[in-house]
Structures are given as structure tokens and as C-alpha cells.
């Protein structure tokens, strides 16, 4: 998988060199073009090796995850800003115990950091057995809905990327 990623980037840089236009837009076009070419070539090989196809599944998931995070970040920023600029406070702060499906240190760290990067939420602690994450939220009107939003949002997408 790492070889395909490096090959994809190398082909994108070759595209930039051949066109002579060093710009982000041109590099992204070269990356998408080389991704499509590598996908076509690997389909034709028919190696039966699942690890070779994993790259072509993972890249769209990473891109989708990036846009999901941007959406959540924008939504949380607007919610906090609205609460700050209006005279009435809509905050309902609380500390919530979230049972974890993520299990590795990388997955837990990624989840905790993404939660903390989103305004209005802060990861506080992980239990010693790594089964529970404690999160402070500014807007915890419904505890079950808060847990569900994290589990169906960040946690599910992290599991899709790492497993």
C-alpha cells in the first residue's frame, strides 16, 4: 500500500514537471489522474491480492474523513459562536462517559484529539482499561444523543480508516 501511495505521489510530481505549472490545483489534478491510472492498471493485473486494492479503498475514505472533519469543525464553531454572541446562553455543559469501540493507542489518541480539536468538546481522560473515554461537552442536552453523535461520527470513521 505504501508503494502505491509513493508511486501515486511520484506520478503527480511527474505530471507537474511535464506541464510546467507548479500549483496546488495542478498537483491535485495530477494526483487524481495518477490514482485513476494506478487503479486501472491494478484492476487489469488481477493478482487476487487484497492488500493491493486496499490503497484504492483507503484514499477515498481519507478524503471523505477530511471533509467530514471540516464539516464538524464548521458546525461546532458556528454553534459556539452563536452561543457567545446571543444574550441568552444555550449551554448545557456536562461530562459524558463514552464506551469505546476503538482499541489501539493510535485509534484512541486520534479520537481524543479530534474531539478536543472540535470547539465545545474536550477529551478529559481514558480509563485504565482503555474501554471508556470521558468527554466534556458544552452542549449536552441529551446524553444519549451526544454519545451517539461521537460513536457514529468520529469513532466509526476512524475504525473505517484503521481496520
Image: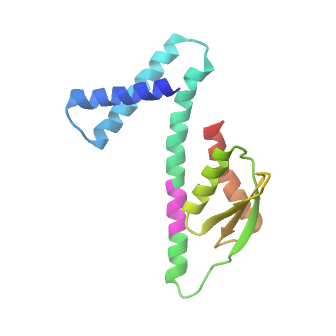
| Magenta span main SS | helix
Residue 116 at x, y = what percent? 59, 62
Query: Which residue in the rendered view is the most extreme toward the bottom?
Result: 87
Would you say 153 lies left or right of 99 here?
left
Is 75 included in the stretch rendered in magenta?
yes
Query: Which residue in the rendered view is the most extreme toward the left?
Result: 20
Residue 41 at x, y = what percent? 45, 16
Answer with the quarter of the image where residue 16 lies.
top left
Q: Between 155 and 33, which is closer to the camera in this rendering?
A: 155
Query: Which residue in the rendered view is the most extreme toward the front?
Result: 128
| Residue bounds of the magenta highlight | 70-77
Q: Between 161 and 68, which is closer to the camera in this rendering?
A: 161
Q: Residue at x 29, y 26 (%)?
A: 14
Residue 132 at x, y = what percent? 77, 56
Q: Residue at x 47, y 22 (%)?
A: 39
Q: Between 37 and 162, which is closer to the camera in this rendering?
A: 162
User: Is 51 situated above or below 26?
Assistant: above
Is 148 included in the stretch rendered in magenta?
no
Would you say 76 lies left or right of 20 here?
right
> Which image quarter is the C terminus in?
top right
Answer with the quarter of the image where residue 29 lies.
top left
Amino acid at each position: 500500500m505504501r508503494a502505491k501511495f509513493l508511486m501515486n505521489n511520484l506520478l503527480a510530481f511527474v505530471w507537474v514537471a511535464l506541464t510546467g505549472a507548479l500549483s496546488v490545483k495542478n498537483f491535485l489534478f495530477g494526483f487524481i489522474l495518477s490514482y485513476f491510472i494506478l487503479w486501472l492498471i491494478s484492476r487489469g493485473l488481477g493478482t487476487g491480492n487484497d492488500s493491493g486494492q486496499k490503497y484504492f479503498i483507503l484514499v477515498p475514505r481519507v478524503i471523505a474523513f477530511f471533509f467530514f472533519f471540516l464539516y464538524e469543525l464548521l458546525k461546532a464553531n458556528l454553534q459556539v459562536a452563536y452561543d457567545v454572541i446571543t444574550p441568552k446562553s444555550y449551554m448545557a455543559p456536562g461530562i459524558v462517559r463514552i464506551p469505546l469501540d476503538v482499541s489501539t493507542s493510535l485509534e484512541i489518541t486520534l479520537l481524543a484529539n479530534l474531539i478536543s480539536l472540535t470547539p465545545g468538546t474536550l477529551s478529559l481522560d481514558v480509563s485504565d482499561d482503555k474501554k471508556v473515554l470521558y468527554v466534556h461537552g458544552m452542549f449536552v442536552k441529551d446524553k444519549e444523543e451526544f454519545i451517539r453523535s461521537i460513536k457514529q461520527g468520529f469513532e466509526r470513521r476512524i475504525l473505517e480508516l484503521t481496520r
